[in-house]
Amino acid sequence: MKAVILAAGEGSRLRPLTLTRPKHMIPVGGKPILEHCLNTIRTYGIREVVLVVHYMANVIENYFGSGDKFGLKIEYAYQKEILGTGNAINAAESYIQEDFLLVYGDLLFTEKTIKKVAETHSKNKPSATLAVVPVDRPEHYGIVELMEENKVKQIIEKPKPNEAPSNLANAGIYAFTTEIFEEAKRISASSRGEWEITDAIANLLKKGRHVYAVEIPKDNWFDIGRPWDLLEANHWMLTKM
């Protein structure tokens, strides 16, 4: 199994830190966020990685190179414009021939999380498997509504506080079949002006395809969205070392 890591965006919410480097290269615990991401994927056992890049791509490529120093084989796919996750995934299509892992490159997570997603996907053989994590403020996330046997019914982006069907947020860690590429080509821009990978997943659901959710503990995952998250992210990482 290969891993695709989305690392094309700037991270505008983290300005001014991202004026001189991509969000994914901000240090946490002494290493770039993206390096922690790659190390966790390697620890699980994946050795081939496709990095989807755009903003300051040279900074990422100069640091990681071919991946040899990190025990990986890294290839680079270039997103022509920053148009959202649903557009970014198609930049990696030519590098993928079978089921693959997809991860947002600005997350911190544990090897147990990757293992749980990959093993659930391998066991059930759905079109997609995604990690979900309980959150305190569902209105800030894409919230996943589940049916029986942890099958996904729908994903609602940033629902109003009293309208969220659950408190389970889409964690940005997936396993997909190659079917996702065709569905990603059929989506259009959302109300936020971006092509969303969750819309491609919605297309799978409309076709009656199975999409499974895997709940992970909150302390196995950390999303860095704002500058003030970095202090807590450093604490999270240092406690895991």
Image (cartoon, rainbow, N blue to C red):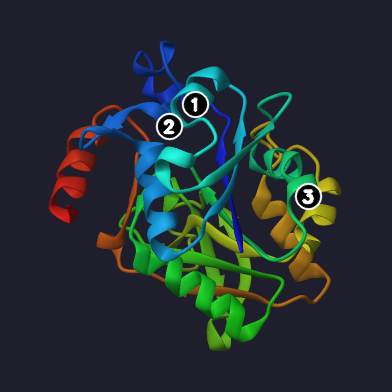
Q: Position of residue 74 (x, y in %)?
A: 57, 41
- Where is residue 22 shown, x and y percent of the image? 46, 23
Q: Nearer the viewer, mark 2 or mark 1?
A: 1
* Residue 219 against residue 227 in the figure, above or below: below
| Residue 44 at least partly seen | yes
- The three-letter code of the residue at mark 1 reads Ile
Tell me the amino acid under the disc marked 2.
His
Q: Secondary structure at mark 3?
A: helix
Reply above or below: 61 against 1.
above
The residue that mark 3 highlights is: 184
Closer to us: 68 or 189: 68
Residue depicted at 44% across the width and 26% down the height: 63
Give x and y (percent) for residue 60: 49, 26
Q: Measure the C-alpha gap from mark 2 to mark 3.
A: 24 Å
Camera-side residue of 126 and 160? 126
**Residue at the spot x=51%, y=30% of the render?**
65
Judge by depth and name the residue closer to the eye, 63 or 186: 63
User: What amino acid is found at the position of numbered circle 3 in the picture?
Assistant: Ala
Q: Which residue is mark 2?
A: 24
Q: Tell me: residue 117, above or below residue 90.
A: below
Going from N to C along the chain, the mark reached first, 2 or 1, is: 2
Q: Secondary structure at mark 1?
A: helix
Q: Quadrant of residue 92?
A: top right
Q: Nearer the viewer, mark 2 or mark 3?
A: 2
State how far apart marks 1 and 3 are (Cα).
25 Å
Whether residue 106 is visible, yes or no, is: no
**Residue occupied by mark 1:** 60
Spot occupied by residue 46 in the image (x, y as percentages of width and height): 51, 60
Task: Give the mark, 2 or 3, whose residue is nearer the N terminus.
Answer: 2
Q: Are marks 2 and 3 in contact (CB under 8 Å)?
A: no
Mark 2, secondary structure of its residue: helix
